[in-house]
Structures are given as structure tokens and as C-alpha cells.
Image (tube, grey):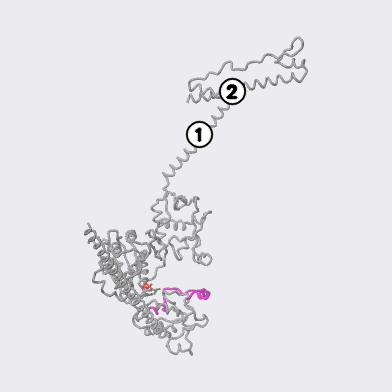
Amino acid sequence: MASVLQSVLTTLLTNAEQEDTSESSSNETQSESPSTSGDPSSSSSTNPNATTSPNGALIPKPKKKLALKKPIQLPNNLTGLIKLLFSFGALRDWLKLFVIGGFVESCRRLTGVLYRKIVESFFITASFQEGDDAYDWVMVWLAKRPAWAKAREVEVSTKTFGLSGTNRAVMVPGDEDDAGVTLSGSSKKLAYLPSLASTYSLWHKGHWMRVSRTEKQKTYYSTEETLNLRQILLEAKREYLASQEHTISIYVSDSTNDWRYVASRPKRPLKSIILDPGIKDLLVDDARDFLASKQWYADRGIPFRRGYLLYGAPGSGKTSIIHSMAGELGLDVYIVSLSRAGLDDTGLNELISDLPTRCIALMEDIDAAFHQVLNRGELDGDSDDEDDSAPPPPDAPPTTGARTSRISLSGLLNALDGVGAQEGRILYATTNKYTSLDPALCRPGRLDIHVEFKLASRYQAREMFKGFYLPNHNQEPPAPEKEEKDVSDSGYSTTSKATPADTPNPTSPTASTTDLQVVTEDKEKERPIPTSFFGNSHWTRGPKLTKQEVEDLANKFAEGIPERQLSMASLQGYLMGYKIRPFDAVKDVAPWVEKELIERVKRQERSEARRKRAEEKRKAEEAKKKEEAEKRKAEGKEETTEETKEETKEEVKS
Ligand SMILES: Nc1ncnc2c1ncn2[C@@H]1O[C@H](COP(=O)(O)OP(=O)(O)OP(=O)(O)O)[C@@H](O)[C@H]1O
């Protein structure tokens, strides 16, 4: 340090010397200049550097040698050096500035550190990462805080945060009573999000909290608050779940084998699914009993899992009952799409083990993941298995063609009950091809309960008819004026509003063939409220039927439906065309059924022809393969014979 200071001082002193020298020389120059330009006498008297000779000429005085007579002695101790430094004015000012600046900066940093320490000791900071459930809870909770509505700077988004239907209104604080903010006719709601890099302060139950949103690799929220964090999170979760009370969440697997939330669906009431008596009760009671029996399973060492296989005719309500059960049991649905391209055994295992503990895993069309029939022969890789020679089941898919996914049967079996299989989950598998499933897949422990869904019975047809037209006394009638305006509703294409085609007319054939009566003005008071679960916006346009009238009509309708010939989906499709015309629905049912049955026969013929073609193609390919194999075998033999001959010749020669 001292040596540095010494070298600095030396430089400074040298500079000072040079400055003095230049000053002196400039003085000299100045003193010379008047003698050359002015009167010598006057110059001599004024010029101190010249003397006058006896002849009057100016004789310049000899030049003074400019040199430090006494060079400054550099002190060799630190104190002396500092003293010397302070003897230079400019340096002194610089040093003062340096010291004051350093002091101010240190104070600033110290205050920052102290502030953070205080904040940390009084506040709790929590970060929520986008994509996590807790993030959605906190978002919905924040949106519901009144203070949030006063925020001056927000980011507007149409994200739903897992909410659907009317619940989405919470995303727009203060807008809950609106019919719904619509964006150019869409039903999307607006959400106010904290804008990036802004900090918001709000009070909650007497506590101050700050909310800031920052973006790193992912966006996340961080809150600093004085409240018990657990309490706030629980509150947020409670409010979120309350918002979701009437919906179920649907998750699907993405290409990275993670579960991704896709949508919320309103719960479908169980009564809207019409099955033969006892089936619904069996499914619901068994699932309820299972969910309540965790300890029972644990005591007996039985894996806490339950599987249901719903099989049968297409459009008979398999998928619908699963969604309805999810609502009834309050479980989310995780759809495992076995035919997703790129899904292999490892991916499937990961997905199944990542399922939450209480949920519904849904595998639709479990047979469709494999183009080949799932059987033991394939599983064991034993091509000579006697099963192979047996003809495939009548509805078995063709056994050739590329697989859509890389799932093997053993992979699926492992995923269902291997070590990684999640406890507490309910598995629903559906198929239209029960006979094509391997018994190993269907055994208890994997798929414990098998329920057949048949084509519609007369009982189901009757109940569906009643569901469309029966008064529902739990609902308030909608305001007629409002309904008048609603022309966008429907699902049917005919019938003018003024004279519904179904309104019995004394002279019309419909009226003459039925004993039902038109509801008169007097009856209007006890006017029935329409359909329980197929919507009610069109009810004012239809005839007002009493319960008994609907039951009579339903019986007539059911009589026209052949037992187990048509699917419930087709019946629903038919009735949708007669939403406000129950009389016509009954009247037209016979010709419709006839047409449907003819269509069905045609469809069956087409499918049989397709199956035959596929079978022939398969046989032809097999024969071709066999022929090629034999040809290769023969060629191989010939080559070997030639080679043996050559070798013998060589041997003989040698
Ligand atoms: N039993 C039923 N009760 C009420 N509606 C039904 C019933 N069966 C089918 N539907 C109606 O038919 C439509 C199709 O039903 P769903 O998808 O549940 O049939 P599915 O058996 O799963 O058909 P698939 O085997 O082709 O997948 C739905 O809109 C549903 O409302």
C-alpha cells in the first residue's frame, strides 16, 4: 500500500515540477515580448528582467534556473504518506467523494438486507407453479377476493382454471350475476390475472399480503403474507372444490406420458341413464362400497383396486354411465387411450402408477388397442397353439395390419395389477367385442365385475320417452317471454312456433287416434313442467301433458319398439327430432322402426361382407407367406447340394 502511494506521489510530484517549469518559461516569454515592441526606456523601467547598459541598451538579466531547490521528501511511513496526500487539494476532494459514496451505498445495502430479514421473520413466502392444482386453487381464490376487483393493472385471459359452466363467472370479479361475458358469441369467460412483474397488496382477514407474478422458465405466483399459509391454502382448495361441485374433471395422457387436464364436464344425473332394473344399483353400490372399504382390503392384504368391464352393443350407455358415476362418486376421470400412437408398455405403466389415489381410470374400447385378437397364443408367442387353428370369433377384428400402439397384452396386464398399479383407483373398461378379450385380462382382480349392456328393451324405451316429456316438479318453469326469444335452441327442424304440429287438433288424425286432451287455459295453472333432463327451453312450445298422459303415450311408444333390436342411442336420436311433438313421436315410430331394421340388416350384410373380405385377404396372405417360405427352403436345399458337390470334388482333387 505504502509503495503504491509512494509511486503515486512520485508521479504527482514530477507532474508538479513540470508544471512549475512550464509556468516559469511562459513568464519569461511574457517578459521578453515588450522589449521588442515598445520604447526601450519605458521598457527598462517596467521590465524587471532587464537592466539598462550605460549606452542605454537593454541587457537581459541572466535567466533563473528553474529547479526544485529542495525536493519533497517522501515519507516512508503510511501516516506520513496520508498526510502528504491530504496536502493536495484535488486529491482530498476525490477521497471525500469516494468515502461518502461508499458510505451511502453500504447504508443502502444494509437497509435492503435488514428489510429482507424483517420480512422473512414476519412473512411467509409461497410460490405456486403453473400447471399444479394448487396454482388453480389460488387463482380462483384470488379472483374471489373483493380487493382484486380494484387492481389497476391486470392481465386478461380466457383460461378457465379447471372451472366450467357458470362457475367460470368467478374469474371475472363482480361479474357473477351477469348472464356471462361472451367473446364474439363464444361462451368463454374472462379471467383477470396479475400482470407480470407487478406486485399487488391486499388485506385478508386483517392480514396484509402481497401477490406478485414472475416468469422464470415457467410462470408462477408467489405470495407473501402474514396469514397461516396452510389455512389460506385450505381455504383456496375448499373454494375451488366448491366451484367444481357440479362438474367432473377429465384428464388425458399427453405424448410425454403425463396426465394433462383437458376439460370439466357438468355432472350427468344418474337418473338420466336408463338401464334395466338393478344394473345401476349394482354399479353404484359396489363402487361406493369399494371406496369405503380401504381398511377391509388392507386387513386382508388384497390390493385396493376395483375393475369393471362394461361390454355390449354400441350406443347402449356404457360411456354415459361411467361419466355419471364419476359425478355421483365425486371422482375425476383419467382417460387411458390405449391406441394412442407412441404409447408403449413402459409409458402405460408410468401412466397407471401416476394416477391419483382416488379416481376413475377409463379405458374405452379396450380391444381396439390391438389389431390382433388378444389371446394366450399371442401372449406366449406360441404360433403352434391350437387356438390359432380355430376360427376367430365372429366379431373378431382382422388379424393383419399395423398396430396403432405398441402395447402388448402382458404390458397391459402388468399395468393393471403390477407393482406400480395405483391403489384406490377404479378402472372402467368398455368394449363392444367381449369375446375377443383374453381371459387373463377379464379375470377378477383386474376386471372384477362384468356388466352387459344390451340393445334397448321396451322398458328402457318407455322410460326414455317419459324422460323426454314427463313433467319435472323439481324445476321452476322458465319465464315464457324469455323462452319466446330463444329461437336458437332445438335439435328438431320442423314445427312452427305458432302451431306446434303436435298440438292436438279436433279434426286431425292424431287427435282422433288418441284419448289425450289438450291442456286448456284452466289447466295452465297446474301446467306441468317439462322434461327432467333433456332440457326445458322448448317446453312452452309443446303440448302441456299431465303425468298420466305422458305415461299412456310412453306405453304406446314402447309397444312400437321391438325388444332388443335398436340401441338406446338411436332411440334418443329419434326422440330428439320430436322434442315438442310427443304425439307425432308415437305416430311415426312404426315406420321409423321398420326403416331402422332394414338399415340394420343392410349394415350387418355390409359388415359381414367386409369381414369375409378381410378373412379371405388374411388367408391369401398366409398362403403366400407359406409358399414363399417353402420356396426359400427348397432354394436353400439346392444351394446346399451344390455346395456339397463342390466340396466333394475339391476333396477328390486334393
Ligand atoms: N341407457 C341409456 N340411457 C340414456 N341414454 C343413453 C343410454 N344409452 C345410450 N344413451 C345415449 O346415447 C348416446 C351414446 O351413449 P354412450 O356413448 O354412452 O354409448 P356406448 O355404449 O358407450 O357406445 P359405444 O360402445 O359406441 O362407445 C349418449 O348421448 C347417451 O345419452
**Percent of width and height locating residue 284:** 32, 70
Q: Residue at x 59, y 15 (%)?
A: 69
Q: Is residue 486 above or below residue 306?
A: below
Q: Residues within 10 Å of mark 2 (few under 14, many from 20)?
A: few
Is residue 5 covered in magenta?
no
Q: Is residue 56 above or below residue 8?
A: above
Q: Residues within 10 Å of mark 1 (few under 14, many from 20)?
A: few
Q: Residue furthest top?
A: 54
Residue holding disc 1: 103
Q: Amino acid at mark 2?
A: Ala
Residue holding disc 2: 16
Q: Are marks 2 and 1 in contact (CB under 8 Å)?
A: no
Task: Report the magenta residues as a range.
Answer: 462-490
Element under disc 1: helix
Disc 1 within 8 angstroms of ligand 1 (CB): no
Quadrant field for ligand 1: bottom left
Q: Residue at x 76, y 20 (%)?
A: 37
Mark 2 / mark 1, whichever is N-terminal:
2
Examine the image and state in which quarter residue 654 appears. bottom left
Q: Amino acid at mark 1?
A: Phe
**Percent of width and height locating residue 62:** 67, 14
Q: Is residue 583 above or below residue 340?
A: below
